[in-house]
Image (tube, helix red, strand yellow):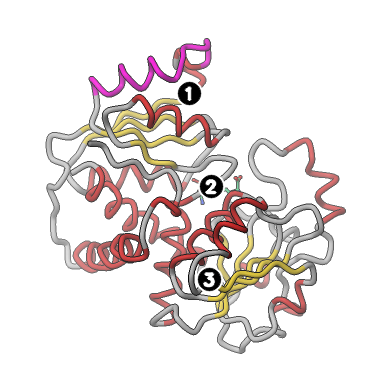
């Protein structure tokens, strides 16, 4: 039976760490020029309804790196754009390829594809979650800090798809998560509550970024207006004033605090240029780790 990756809460602590442990090995093997063939004879289709640089290229490169083949489909050039049902798309694609990697708006789109597909469906970002990204981000934190257990990770900004996936990661992976969001822009209440109820979970939401980052080991941010929210850009610039990750905010964290950003970044909005390009920011390493995590995901779900 196909195992889908739609959200992190579908996986146990051990399963989540297994992706990361495997990605670390695959990264080392890649550096040692070890060739892989786990996906030889397999074809992966990417169906993207939103823009992407990192996720598309890293999934494509990961597939080729494991010896597989990729077909990229811009959703607007498929019959989905002419309202062909997701059910028919899932059934038909399942006859052609071995896995579907999907970037879209509604989480219900990936759920519906997964309901009918007989091949694995991987969520490459929806409005609700960005699970593969957060796996690469947690991997990056482990690389930089050695472990997660005693770390304080702070999310500063919008309670968006990235924040929701960080909440689900924190529910299972031992670190403390504090989210500083403007009133009304917190992570989704049901996702937050479900995560907070997990044994050992330490997840809180506050509205003051300065309070939140006291003693932080990791500060994490993302754009204030996500894809699909372009019409709210001006309003959000106003709402999120005071939530920029800049040098002054960073001074409240631990001196060795690292700064995460999944990219693309809007310089001088959610993050100042000096912090984004400064020594504490690990955004480019995060971006690299998407390649290794995607290999681990493809290997587990599709090989
Ligand atoms: N971080 C991320 O998902 O980047 P892309 O939108 O470029 O894929
Ligand atoms: N929250 C952002 C993440 C982009 C990788 C968005 O959804 O646009």
> If the image is split into quadrants, where does the C terminus sit?
top left
- Of the image marks 3 and 2, the number of the one nearer the N terminus: 2
Q: Residue furthest bottom?
A: 255
Q: Position of residue 71 (x, y in %)?
A: 31, 28
Q: Are marks 1 and 2 in contact (CB under 8 Å)?
A: no
| Crowd rating for badge 1 (residues with CA inside 10 Å; few <14, some 14–19, many 20+) | some
| 279 is higher (above) or lower (below) than 155 | below
| Crowd rating for badge 2 (residues with CA inside 10 Å; few <14, some 14–19, many 20+) | many
Q: Position of residue 139 (x, y in %)?
A: 39, 67
Q: CA distance from mark 1 to mark 2?
A: 19 Å
Query: Is 205 left, or right, of 40 in this rendering?
Result: right
Magenta residues: mostly which secondary structure?
helix
Query: Is 197 left, or right, of 226 in this rendering?
Result: left
Callout 2: SS: loop
Highlighted range, magenta: 81-96
Mark 3 vs mark 2, foreground winner is 3
Q: Using the rendered view, name the quadrant where residue 215 is placed.
A: bottom right
Callout 1: SS: helix
Q: CA distance from mark 3 to mark 2?
A: 19 Å
- Say which residue label 1 marks: 75
| Crowd rating for badge 3 (residues with CA inside 10 Å; few <14, some 14–19, many 20+) | many
Residue 201 is tagged as: 3
- Of the image marks 3 and 1, the number of the one nearer the N terminus: 1
Q: Is residue 87 magenta?
A: yes
- Of the image marks 1 and 2, the number of the one nearer the N terminus: 1
């Amino acid at each position: 039976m196909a195992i889908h990756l739609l959200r992190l809460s579908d996986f146990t602590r051990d399963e989540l760490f297994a992706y990361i442990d495997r990605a670390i090995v695959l990264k080392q093997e890649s550096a040692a020029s070890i060739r892989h063939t786990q996906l030889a004879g397999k074809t992966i289709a990417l169906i993207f309804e939103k823009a992407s640089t990192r996720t598309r290229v890293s999934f494509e490169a990961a597939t080729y790196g494991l010896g597989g083949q990729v077909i990229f489909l811009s959703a607007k050039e498929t019959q989905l754009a002419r309202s062909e049902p997701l059910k028919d798309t899932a059934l038909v694609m399942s006859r052609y390829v071995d896995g579907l990697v999907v970037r879209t708006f509604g989480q219900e789109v990936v759920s519906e594809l997964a309901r009918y597909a007989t091949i694995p469906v991987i969520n490459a970002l929806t409005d609700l979650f960005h699970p593969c990204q957060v796996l690469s981000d947690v991997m990056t934190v482990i690389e930089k800090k050695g472990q997660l257990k005693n770390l304080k990770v702070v999310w500063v900004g919008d309670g968006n798809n990235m924040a929701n996936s960080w909440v689900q990661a924190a529910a299972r992976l031992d670190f403390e998560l504090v989210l500083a969001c403007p009133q009304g822009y917190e992570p989704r209440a049901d996702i937050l509550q479900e995560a907070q109820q997990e044994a050992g979970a330490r997840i809180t939401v506050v509205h003051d970024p300065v309070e939140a980052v006291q003693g932080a080991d990791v500060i994490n941010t993302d754009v204030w207006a996500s894809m699909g929210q372009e019409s709210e850009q001006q309003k959000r610039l106003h709402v999120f004033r005071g939530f920029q990750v800049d040098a002054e905010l960073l001074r409240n964290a631990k001196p060795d605090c690292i700064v995460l950003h999944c990219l693309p970044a809007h310089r001088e909005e959610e993050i100042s240029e000096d912090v984004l390009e400064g020594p504490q920011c690990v955004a480019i390493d995060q971006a690299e780790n998407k390649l290794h995590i995607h290999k681990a995901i493809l290997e587990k779900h599709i090989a």
